[in-house]
Amino acid sequence: MPSDSKVKALVLTGFGLNCDVETAHTLSLAGAEAHRVHISDLTGTRQRKATETLDDYQILVFDGGFAWGDDHGAGVLLATRLGNHLGDQLRAFLDRGGLVMGICNGFQALVNLGLLPMLDGWKRQVALAANDCGNFQDRWVELLVEPTSACLFTQGMSRLDLPVRHGEGKLVCDDATLAELESRGMVAVRYGNGRGKPAKGKWPANPNGSLNDIAGICDPTGRVFGLMPHPEGYYRASQHPDWTLIRERARRKGAEPDPLGPGAGLSMFTNAVAAARGGLA
Amino acid sequence: MAKRLEIGLKPQLNDPAGSGLYAKARAYLGLALEQVRVLRVLTFDTKLDDTELERVRSEIFTNPVTEMSSFEPLADKALPGFDWALWVGYKPGVKDNEGATAIEAMADALGHRFGEDEAVYSSRLYLIKAPKLTREGAEAISRELLANDLIQLWRVIPAEDWDPDQGIGVVIPRVELAHTPSVKSLAIGSDVELLALSAQRDLFLNPADVPVIRAYFNDPEVRAQRQKVGLGDPTDVELEYVSQARSDHCNHNTFGGRFHYQDLVSGERKVVANLFKETIKEPTEKLAAAKDWVVSVLWDNAGVAKLDDTHNYVITGETHNSPSNMEAYGGAITGIVGVYRDPMGTGKGSKLVAGLWGYCVAPRDYDGELTPALHPRRLLDGIIEGVRDGGNKSGIPTASGLLHFDPQYLGKCLVFVSAVGVIPAEINGEPTEDKTTEPGQLVIMCGGRVGADGIHGVTASSAGYSENTPAGHVQIGDPYTQKKMHDFLLEARDAGLVPYLTDNGGGGLSSSVGESARFSPGAEVDLKKVPLKYEGLDPWQIWVSESQERMTVAVEPDDEAAFMDLADKHQVEATVIGRFTGDGKLRLDHGDEVCCYVDVEFLEEGFPQWEFEALWTPPEARGLSEPVISPPKDFNGLVLDLLDSPNLCSREWINRQYDHEVQGTSLLKPFCGRGQDTPAEASVILPVLTSPVGLAMAQVIAPEYGIIDTKAMVQASIDEAYRRLVAVGGDPEQVGGVDNFCWPSIIYHPVNNPDGRYKAAQLVRACWGLKEACEALEIPLLSGKDSMYVDGTLAARYGASQRVSGPCTMMFTATAPVPDLGALQSLEPKLAGDYVYCLGVTSNELGGSALYGLWDQVGLNAPLADFAATRALGAAVHQGLKGGMVASAAVVSRGGLAITLARMVLASRLGLEVDLDCLEVGGQVSGMQRLFSESQGRMLVTVPSKRCNEFEDLLEDVPWARMGRVVRGRELTVGYEGRQVLELGETQMRRAWQRRFGRMV
């Protein structure tokens, strides 16, 4: 693509998704031209034709929320709806190197669609089951980036704090799948214990009981990435729960950090934009 | 033929829902179970064939990685050798959200159009292995942990009765009303006749209103006009309409009442001509006129104030007490989802940006003799979960809240829910706070459908029950449907398609259409066009039904196609049900039958004011006095016990299950500190991501002070709310308030409510306190609501029953923009070496304090707010925050300095070394009083040593004391008169503070 044109990112909206505004805002900060597109505009309805296609975009984000109320399994009805209507478009999108990111509810949808982990084609091989603790949790976790992962979204990152906000985030799969995820570098991020080491299943550092502390995975190409924590939940410095301390320490050194300055989660989006620019150039 | 699908987790997987029931059975009922597995059950009452059913089973309803499913009973596979099977499903007519989304998903996947008579019903089957569990125990689990008879059906099946082929059988909770809708004309020949009719139909007409109603319908001119459309005597639709509109819930007759106040000791008498007008409306109007940031108050569904140059924020708060008291989950989810429709229906419609909660219940461990409808523990669990699902699924951050225990809430719990929205100040060049209807515009109802929901709760519960009677008087909110409607209406608004909208809450269409029609003025609606959940509803039921998730919108006829196209995009049902006219009449038809024809202004005029006697006995005359308590030797133990007390201990588990960060707006979360577990003084969000202006929100209740004097209670609450906003960086010059009164009945009755006149005086004094505080602190009341009957009659010992009236309670919610994000601050000290300042005066004011509460004492000296001092404090601290001098700011509130200092240590994981001798005090104040007094107008702030001089320069009008320093080593040490009175480690305090609820998730 010409260097002066912006990377176009599509953020899904509608039917109970609810992180579309801040996700689009984050993508804009990351340099993309972000569009919030209603699912009906992609799939059409009985009375309306589809008005949007994935063909115009380089990044597709399945953002967080409660699509269809998360009834019948989180992300399940979103996955069936998109699978029914957009299967071919999604295939074409992936074939031409598009990037897909699924956050929280979006990650749940990706595994139900079979876009992740894509070990051998579109299959449901991984599930995000109810948290072991039995309830929805909003808390900040430490996230450890797997250095050897193929994931394009986490390149150059090591550890960061992000919020999790879900009731169904426990990654479950059979042993063979798990072994393959690990051996093929498809585990992108894990829950840390707060001191840079894996949480080893311990609650609440691992907030849901995920196997091997897995918080996010990618497909073998690294271009499709899903995670339970919300990187757009820390797109801005002042979202961090320790913001006032971070700022105070800076003030003692004579600095005044910008509350609207970047947060660590933003990097996943700037990585995506950079990858889209490079990959589709 | 109906088919039943059972879905369960594969046996090797952990079942958190089953574990949850296992834990609750043990903790709540003392029942030891061995194992629990839960099956989801979907019953398909559809015309799908077996191939189609198999397709949806495998493609939609079963996760191949984690689940197994079958149209045959699955129990023996899910838990071989189970002892009990407990089935729980919904009663007919109860909103079944899972059933509805199942139909939606199948329609899309199969390309199939389901008929009105096809449905999917969801239910659950709990399989329990517990060889020693008796039938009694199994029934207790069903009744007390799983099901509520008001909305659910349940069955208990022991293994020996289990039919492995049929399982639980097939239950179809379809509503079948064998009823042909009709309109009745009702004779009201005399007042007696109308009163009898009122009693018979549960209209609750006030006897004083009866002559006015009759006079209207007997007016010769009215009769002549009615005759022209074929009407004579009033119809049932009309009388039900009057009943709704004149109810205290809709009309606020109590607050609008005339009060004859008398102080029984001094003999002083005062007449309050209209409580609402004098204490709320007029002060707010004056402030609104003086402050350009107040945009719209006192008329719409919520108040509107300026956020920044191009955006306004919208706020309201209400309660959902009675429904929650009967069915906690349903009541609470309906409450939070319902209050979200108020900002949505304010002006041309605002985007929801925050929800707030407040729960008042009897102690969780109540084991007294009275039997409430639901035990407080179960009640609280249900309320928490209802707001969780309602808030989280709405995609609106549940920003903060409070929980308060008092045994008097056993009669009725309080569930406060507040909602904040944001709206561009102008859209297409027009101010968004204005809205009006005009003749010719269409009346459109959108969102959910209408059933027999919320109609005469009382009659519905006592009417004869059959298997197919809709259990509609307690509802379950549907955040999914409403979220779609929210997104739809905002898009329609931005496209300029919405000149007017309002929500359908209490009173349903009768209220929303009735109010909208006052602008045009006039409307015609055909009730037959209103989409129904099921057939058989009478026109009057359609008119007053309170079915949720509905908005009424006015749309220009030329815009109908565009509006409907957007509705279809968002898959929201929208229906033209009539049009606005200009003839001043409200005309309702049901097909070709006229069923209502009245003047739209009729309900506004000529009704007599309610009158109350209000007799005040001052606290001394009621026998209240200060307790005689010698200074304790063990202050450490005392502070630990306070930290452990139900009203001061950690309630982290509640907001932890609420998404308080969605929308990416979080600036100050409900939790702060290193462990992110200490409650913040207020929550702050960035409502518009592209604008650098925050919005701070604080809530306070203080019912303990009300036992002494409700005036002191209200003033302390407002003083504290103001300080909380200041502490987090809110602009003290732009504080808006929301008052939510929850009061026991003030209608005197010599037998049933013998102290009604005292309660009325408590209300008058509370409102006087409100007026004074708002005038002094210049806080306009952006919104407010009242809930006037916080009483319950509970079964007691010996077959008696006892009336329990709730404590007089007012929640004050305050908001302020944070225009300078550099002023944003949290309560925890940041760095060792900083100085600790106590700002404000500490006096002997422990009446109603947490300390006295520990000894079951009330005392007499309730804290009295000094608003001039508080304003000076607010101004100084705000300057200090803006100048970056203040490194932490905390309010001194419940538990006094001791608890505030403890909270600072808990949050910072640093130590504090402070001294009480230097405090600015009012009169003789002992060490105990210095530590635990709840004097208002105080804050604790920390300041780096280099900024102290600069900061102290700001304190010209503020009494202050540099009382100590922040130190390393996580210890709180407090000295007084040369010795250490308090020495507590952070871990020790945390243990006490988290002991009670710390393990709850």
Image (cartoon, coloured by chain):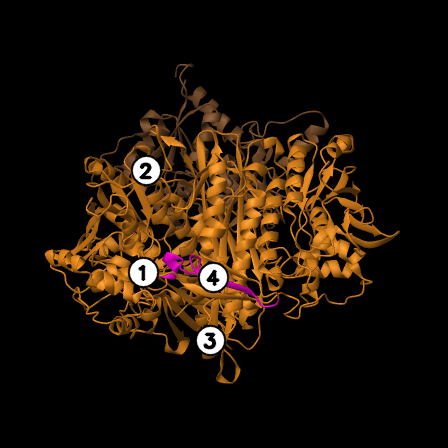
Chain colours: A brown, B orange
- Residue pointed to by mark 3: B752
Number of the front mark, 1 or 4: 4
Q: Is residue B401 visible?
A: no
Up the image or down, A264 lies above or below B350; here it is above
Please tell me the numbered disc located at residue B244.
Answer: 1
Please tell me the numbered disc located at residue A39.
Answer: 2
Marks 1/2: CA distance? 40 Å
Pointer 2 with pointer 4, Cβ within 8 A:
no
Occupied quadrant, residue B235: bottom left
Occupied quadrant, residue A198: top right
First along the sequence among labels 3 and 1: 1
Residue B536: percent from the left, percent from the top? 20, 63
Number of the front mark, 4 or 3: 4
Q: In this view, does B132 lie to the left or right of B108?
A: right
| Span shown in magenta | B245-265
Q: Between residues B877 and B490, which one lies in front from this camera angle?
A: B877
Number of the front mark, 2 or 3: 3
- Residue B264 belongs to magenta span: yes
Helix, strand or loop at label 4? It is strand
Local crowd at mark 2 within 10 Å, few (<14), some, or many (≥20)? many
- Residue pointed to by mark 4: B259
In the rendered structure, the residue with mark 3 lies on which chain?
A: B
In the rendered structure, the residue with mark 4 lies on which chain?
A: B
**Tag 4 and tag 3 share a subunit:** yes
Q: What residue type is labelled 4?
A: Phe
